[in-house]
């Protein structure tokens, strides 16, 4: 079964973020949200997204600056498709957004159906995102992020779909802590993440009570520390 495309909606308006999350989720996407550029950067550091819906007018760092930062990155982050939103129907704004590398531009207010059609058009044009990563070794256990498979000495260990997604997120940022808030945005409320981590430790660690590979980083979140 093909995984749903994962979108990140970046907008400082709580109402718009929630409406877009609900609408796009009903349309079959996985949707994470961020209220500002700083929160978006944290999520981009840990998670591969298929497309960003990015508001231009935000307090602090605006969407143009964030788009420029994204396009300056190497690898998957820099090639993430961007659809920019703005409340100003000005030609210079559209030109600026497109010159920074946005794939499309939509003016508020807009019909959700039009947004959906534009997202689908961008994804059809975009090259498939290969979610490839090095195989992660944790003692006798091995995780293949591309296949979503965990094995122990070659024997498969069953993972739920949510455990695969969480392990992929941690594997992408291996040896670096991933903020609990970022994990909650992508994988459910903090308590749900804690439960998944506990279950993963039972499958990964020789001694789940004293984890060697899936570590808690006090005051931050969790970190995968493979061999």
Image (tube, rainbow, N blue to C red):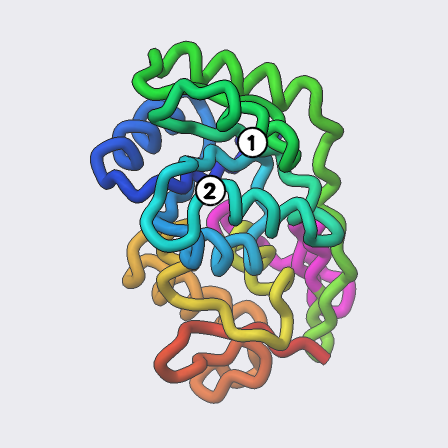
Cα gap from disc 2 to disc 1, whole angstroms: 9 Å
Q: Mark 1 — residue?
A: 97
Say which quarter of the image contains residue 108.
Answer: top left
- Region in magenta: 143-162
Question: Nearest the camera: 125 or 170?
Answer: 125
* Mark 1 neighbour density, 10 Å: few (under 14) some (14–19) many (20 or more): many
Q: Helix or strand or loop: what does disc 2 sit on?
A: helix
Task: Identify the residue shown where x is 34% and y is 12%.
Answer: 111
Residue 95 at x, y percent in the picture: 58, 25
Q: Horizontal and vertical percent for residue 220?
A: 40, 76
Q: Are marks 2 and 1 in contact (CB under 8 Å)?
A: yes
Tell whether 141 sits left or right of 219.
right
Say whether residue 100 is left or right of residue 87: right
**70 horizontally vs 125: left or right:** left
Q: Residue furthest left?
A: 15
Report the residue at 37% width, 51% height from top. 36
Name the residue: 57% across, 31% down: 96
């Amino acid at each position: 079964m093909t995984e749903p495309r994962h979108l990140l909606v970046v907008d400082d308006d709580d109402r718009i973020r929630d409406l877009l999350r609900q609408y796009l989720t009903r349309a079959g996407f996985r949707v994470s949200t961020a209220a500002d550029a700083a929160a978006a950067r944290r999520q981009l550091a840990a998670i591969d997204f298929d497309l960003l819906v990015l508001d231009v007018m935000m307090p602090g760092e605006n969407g143009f600056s964030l788009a420029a930062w994204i396009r300056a990155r190497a690898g998957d982050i820099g090639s993430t498709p961007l659809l920019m939103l703005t409340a100003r129907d000005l030609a210079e704004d559209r030109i600026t957004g497109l010159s920074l590398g946005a794939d499309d531009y939509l003016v508020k207010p807009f019909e959700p159906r039009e947004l959906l059609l534009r997202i689908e058009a961008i994804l059809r044009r975009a090259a498939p995102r290969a979610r490839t990563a090095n195989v992660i070794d944790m003692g006798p256990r091995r995780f293949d992020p591309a296949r979503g498979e965990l094995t122990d000495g070659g024997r498969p260990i069953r993972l739920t779909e949510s455990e695969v997604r969480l392990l992929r997120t941690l594997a992408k940022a291996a040896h670096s802590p991933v903020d609990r808030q970022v994990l909650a945005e992508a994988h459910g409320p903090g308590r749900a993440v804690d439960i998944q981590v506990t279950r993963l430790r039972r499958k990964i660690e020789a001694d789940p009570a004293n984890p060697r590979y899936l570590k808690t980083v006090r005051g931050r979140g969790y970190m995968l520390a493979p061999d």
